[in-house]
Amino acid sequence: MSEPLRIALAGLGTVGTGVIRLIETNAQLIARRARRPIVITAVSARDRTKDRGVDLSGYAWHDDLTAMAALDNVDVVVELVGGSDGPALTLARNTIAAGKALVTANKAMIAHHGLELASAAEAAGTPLKFEAAVAGGIPVIKGLSEGAAANSFERVYGILNGTCNYILSTMEDTGADFADVLSDAQRLGYAEADPTFDIEGIDAAHKLAILAAISFGAKLDFAGVDATGISRIIAADIAQARALGYVIRLLGVAETDTSNGALSLFQRVRPHLVPIDHPLAHVDGPTNAIVAEGNFMGRLLFQGAGAGDGPTASAVVADIIDIARGERGAAFSMPVAELEPMGRAETGHRPVRAYIRFTVKDRPGVLAEITAAMRDAGLSMESLIQQGRADEGGEVIIAMVTHEGPELAVTQALDLLKGSDNLTAPPLWMGIIGD
Amino acid sequence: MSEPLRIALAGLGTVGTGVIRLIETNAQLIARRARRPIVITAVSARDRTKDRGVDLSGYAWHDDLTAMAALDNVDVVVELVGGSDGPALTLARNTIAAGKALVTANKAMIAHHGLELASAAEAAGTPLKFEAAVAGGIPVIKGLSEGAAANSFERVYGILNGTCNYILSTMEDTGADFADVLSDAQRLGYAEADPTFDIEGIDAAHKLAILAAISFGAKLDFAGVDATGISRIIAADIAQARALGYVIRLLGVAETDTSNGALSLFQRVRPHLVPIDHPLAHVDGPTNAIVAEGNFMGRLLFQGAGAGDGPTASAVVADIIDIARGERGAAFSMPVAELEPMGRAETGHRPVRAYIRFTVKDRPGVLAEITAAMRDAGLSMESLIQQGRADEGGEVIIAMVTHEGPELAVTQALDLLKGSDNLTAPPLWMGIIGD
């Protein structure tokens, strides 16, 4: 058994205390697997006096977390402070500059500064690892960058935000509307007091940008993710989708596109309709799941707990065990210099079967106006459900699924209807995820 | 970019030719990910003249595959010959003895000789890798031994044989009986001409023993797997299970047991009833899926193609990429000396809800005899379906689900009924997989 691997832990929120509990609980097993003990030698957080439910007396306390990078008795700094910039980023830069390994669960920091940090880590010859930044306890970064590394990926997509999945699957089970389920979720701890990052798709976009860079060998481009959240989904959408054989899930989808001659990257976070016989249709509650399609392996699915102290700690400590074992994979599966800068894919030509929901006045001529716009845009309809809303005076929901056609036809049809006084709210369209 | 990693390929069946196609098709991408080119320098198979649909003219041919271990221009030998002993084992031993890396898809050889080979590889300081031996294209060995390495596993179970899953899900879809679906599966290439290893659970047992050793840090004990296949499942079982809210799947299940004071290992391959809301209930066709439950990560699911040339080649080449990257994980997640010898778990005390199917004569007193035996064994019934079989003269199917009780009560009740002339065939019981 070799020398212990010494860990400094910056940030003692639920994940940080989870890491302490895990390393204490599974110490012997981890030492057998890592071929050396893993010991925490230093901890830091904002408030020393707070009761966190774990005994910190055995660990050296440091008030200045950014100074932990310079400690002599530390091999790995674990950054669990959070925030894309500020102290987390300073600590990350200092750690790498000091030639120490960095493990982080910080998806925002990696989405914004991952390439800079990975380049610095390569130059310093030190590992940078962030399994916990994507999909909590699911080892999907390892799965894609190592387990599936022999494949050219055709598409990578999945459920990357547990809060949204909890809200959507609860709307499905209860028939309740978005706002009611969100406030329940906040009360139960499944959603933050400020839920914007989750429900508007930003958190999923952070994760998708990281997965896309790894899968497609692309320069990470968080700003290139087209992100829309779930706040416009209403109970009627869930019901109509169900009647048509689908459930609604917020999916991140990434693929490459060569349709305009150059290799470009498509990255989108949006609610989608998922056929009920698709594996992602059975992913309920705060679970995450990622599908990767490779040119030799076919379709691979990873599913598990996307958040929470235990699962996230599991991913953090898996990274630490990798470092203890001497494994030195590139942060994004290949060296930063090998990652290709890719343009952002045009979307107008993408083939899509679309669900479109109109909220309209209950009067003659409405359907004629809608169908005329569809005809003029070259968009043809596969099925339609029209239903009055008992609780809204004179308002009618029209939900339809189109035949496959270019996305441009969908957006053109909706453009033609813009400003129509038959519509009581902007229409909502969602793509149907296909095979 | 470093020197190429040089591969010798022994065995050119569907997987071997798949590996050639993969390495040729994805060469550039693999070189970026592996940080060096991967090149095949030597190939060997029984018949040089056979048309395999790939051009072998660029690769040095060797008639004696076991001699490939000694080639100077080879860094990694890929063994795809098959068979637990014979030339495959000779080649494996020679390769390791020559200090070269060994990659194999040979589950039978690893199940029988994995510890010997892993010890030799450790002594020689050379990698031994066999991702493709378990669950085809699913990187579950990496997932458990690295991605989930921070966890103490509570249970590992899953669908490990695509042939059986194809047969069971086809029986489900068509209502056909086992023998008919098997012969269709053989015609379609989903089952071998001699299907014994698949349908009697031996193939799944090979894989389960490997997963159990990795997950529980146990000395590999293939002979300790209690394996029963699917050949006794009849159409009525599928129908009754469905009526009760279940599907039938052949599952490998492994867990540790401390009930008798010492740590022992439970390893079983058997058909189980799976509740229709369980993720494994939606795994259809020749797909594999593995669930691992860890004390911090919770439940993790891996799902994908369990066989086929492309998926298996994907796993083989992932191992080669790991070796190219200089990663040197222990074959069974920890050094062989750290693996604990574990006794085989007693099963009588295990709590189970059981499905029991009786095939009985249609005459008075039969149910009284069965229920008396259950009462005497202390086994209580939750639900029962009795149904005449139109096609069998006077034969009746009685299917029941018991309340939870010790397995011993189930086997005792069936022992009490042994020899009863009311039964026209031995009863079949299956456990219900629980949360």
Image (tube, coloured by chain):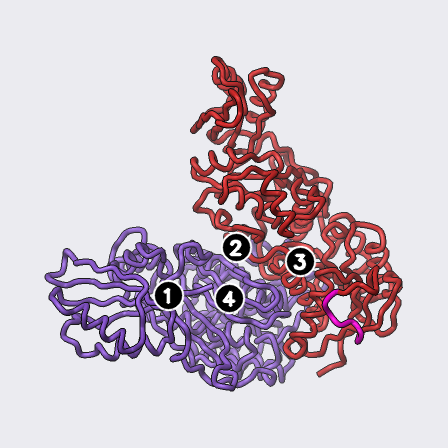
Chain colours: A red, B purple
Judging from the image, mark 4 belongs to the subunit labelled B
Q: Which residue is mark 1?
A: B272
Residues under numbered marks 1 and 3 in contact, where contact means CB atoms less than 8 Å apart: no
B228 left or right, relative to B56: left
Query: Do marks 2 and 4 share a chain?
Result: no
Q: Secondary structure at mark 4?
A: helix
Q: Which residue is mark 2?
A: A300
Distance from disc 1 to disc 3, alpha carbons, whole Å, reads 41 Å
Query: Do marks 2 and 1 share a chain?
Result: no
Q: Which residue is mark 4?
A: B132
Q: Nearer the viewer, mark 3 or mark 2?
A: 2
Q: Residue flagged by tag 1: what amino acid is it?
A: His
Q: Which of the 4 image quadrants contains residue B327?
A: bottom right
Residue B185: image x %, image y %?
A: 31, 58
Residue A137: image x %, image y %?
A: 62, 60
Query: Which label is found at residue B33?
Result: 3
Taking the view exactly as shown, the residue that stands out farthest to the top is A364
Front residue of this view, candidates A62 and B404? B404
Distance from disc 2 to disc 4, alpha carbons, whole Å, reads 14 Å
Q: Secondary structure at mark 1?
A: strand
Residue A130: image x %, image y %?
A: 71, 59
Distance from disc 4 to disc 1, alpha carbons, whole Å, reads 25 Å
> Which comes before the other along the chain, label 3 or label 4?
3
Q: How many marks are shown on the rendered structure?
A: 4
Query: Do marks 1 and 3 share a chain?
Result: yes
| Neighbourhood count class around disc 2 (C-alpha, 10 Å): few under 14, some 14–19, many 20 upward | many
Residue A415: image x %, image y %?
A: 61, 21
